[in-house]
Amino acid sequence: MASKSEVFSSRWGMLLAMLGMAVGTGNIWRFPRIAASNGGGSFLVAWVVFLLLWSVPLLILEFGMGKGTRKGAIGAFVKTLGPNFAWMGAFVAFVATAIMFYYSVVMGWTIRFFVGTLTGEVPGATPSAFWDSFHSTSGALVTHVIAMALGVFVVSKGVKGIETAAKVLIPSLIVLVVLLALRAVTLPGASAGLAFLFTPDWAALGNYQIWVEALTQNAWDTGAGWGLVLTYAVYMRANEDTALNAFVIGFGNNAMSLLAGIMVLCTVFSVMPEAADEIVGAGNEGLTFIWVPQLFAQMPGGRFFQALFFLALVFAAWTSLVAMIEMASRVLMDLGLSRGRAISIIGTAGVLFGIPSALKLEVFQNQDWVWGVALMICGFFFAFAVLRFGVTKWRETFINQEGSDIHIGAWWDWAMRLVAVEAVVLTGWFLWSARTDDFRETWTLLSPYNVGSVVIQIAIAIVVLVLANRWLAARVQEVDMTHDEA
């Protein structure tokens, strides 16, 4: 249980920390590519719909669960569902921690490209020269360790450290992204990028692929269903509202994605309109680390704005990594470890288990795929928890508390039922899309983008956690009783 001193000092500090958790590299490097690849304006329509039908309902749930239970993921599920479901909370925590193992690698990339921009190494002689010479090398391992060290440093200072870092990094990030977006819209020909991004083709909304991608983007870039909001909500002040905060975080996060989309697409349509399809189809790493430097190289003052771009990525990755480290550490603290020891264990594990992704990009892609799909299962577990508890009773108990700024109505009850359906449908869609005609290719363990990678690894994780369920539940309850007696 969080100590009385471990609370955010203000609503502003709490919201900035939450926004830092939500805004990450997915907003800046993934959203522009996905929006451009799925019709621009048409995608935005579906994206906003799922902000209201997936992200905000889950954010409200996590705010209420964290504040109401004052426990990390395992303890929160035990208090909500009973000791038989500790494994569900453990799975949520494990998935976010598994993502942390390679997310620190991504942050390391952003650090190296920021430094490379300052030294003039980026861009190289050819578009992919610097990227090819860096990723999957010892250099990537070094920056991975630096990223983990920066994240651990912030978390080691406790909630006050997280809040202080957020008060510096998030306003700085917002300023950087706004400056880059303003620069992009003032480029010659930028209006074509704006028209593409904001002009929907209503007929295209009949394509189910756009809706699937819009739901996926919401799931991956808001942090809803990850257990991160739940963890930060443990440190909310007693009189803090939950529902309004969830709306602020959801819309604030997606506003950052939209600014990133404006920044990238306006620049592409202005500088290299003939290569727009190739650029946005290059994948997250290709778009960010190969093409973005080429785009900035052709702009007046391009090196300066390129430095701002990669610095923004560093800040976005840093605040999200801090949330993942704190989430994992909070779980260990609920199991009886001191903050210092918990952070040491998580920091060491992060460095060690991030090595495969740092040295071999294929492993990164596999883990990104596996645990990205697992996030849909996490969303289902959260929805299952409140549905089993009694969704209306849960809403009145944990959300519509005395002093709430806004009252959440019965629409949320139906939204949670829909979240459960969305999670099942999306998981099924991912697995179906990854199938191949050759059974041997479909069922391999570490190859990117196949059914076996997801099913086998997730099944192993669930079996192990189910077997450990009794110990996890008993330990959390024992620690909880000890704190109550103290």
Image (cartoon, grey):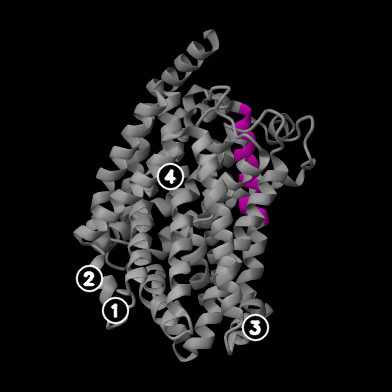
Residue that extends furthest to the left in the rendered view of this protein:
138
Q: Name the secondary structure under disc 3.
A: helix
Q: Name the secondary structure under disc 4.
A: helix
Density class for disc 2 (Cα within 10 Å; few <14, some 14-19, many ≥20) is few
The alpha-carbon separation of the residues under discs 3 and 1 comes to: 32 Å
Label 1 vs label 2, nearer the camera:
1
Amino acid type, label 1: Gly
Q: Is residue 420 magenta?
A: no
First reached walking from the N terminus: tag 1 or tag 2: 1
Q: Which residue is mark 3?
A: 195
Q: Which residue is mark 4?
A: 96
First reached walking from the N terminus: tag 4 or tag 2: 4
Image position of 38 with respect to 412: above or below? below
Question: What residue is rendered at 61% in x and 41% in y?
Answer: 14
Q: Which residue is mark 1?
A: 124
Label 2 vs label 3, nearer the camera:
2
How many marks on residues?
4
> Looking at the image, can residue 208 be seen?
no
In the image, 58 versus 130, the foreground residue is: 130
The alpha-carbon separation of the residues under discs 4 and 1 comes to: 34 Å
Please state the extent of the stretch shown in magenta in the rendering.
52-68
Is 181 positioned to the left or the right of 415 in the image?
left
Amino acid type, label 3: Ala
First reached walking from the N terminus: tag 3 or tag 1: 1
Is 297 positioned to the left or the right of 121 in the image?
right
Image position of 358 with respect to 264: above or below? above
Q: Name the secondary structure under disc 1.
A: loop
Q: Which residue is mark 2?
A: 133
Density class for disc 1 (Cα within 10 Å; few <14, some 14-19, many ≥20) is some
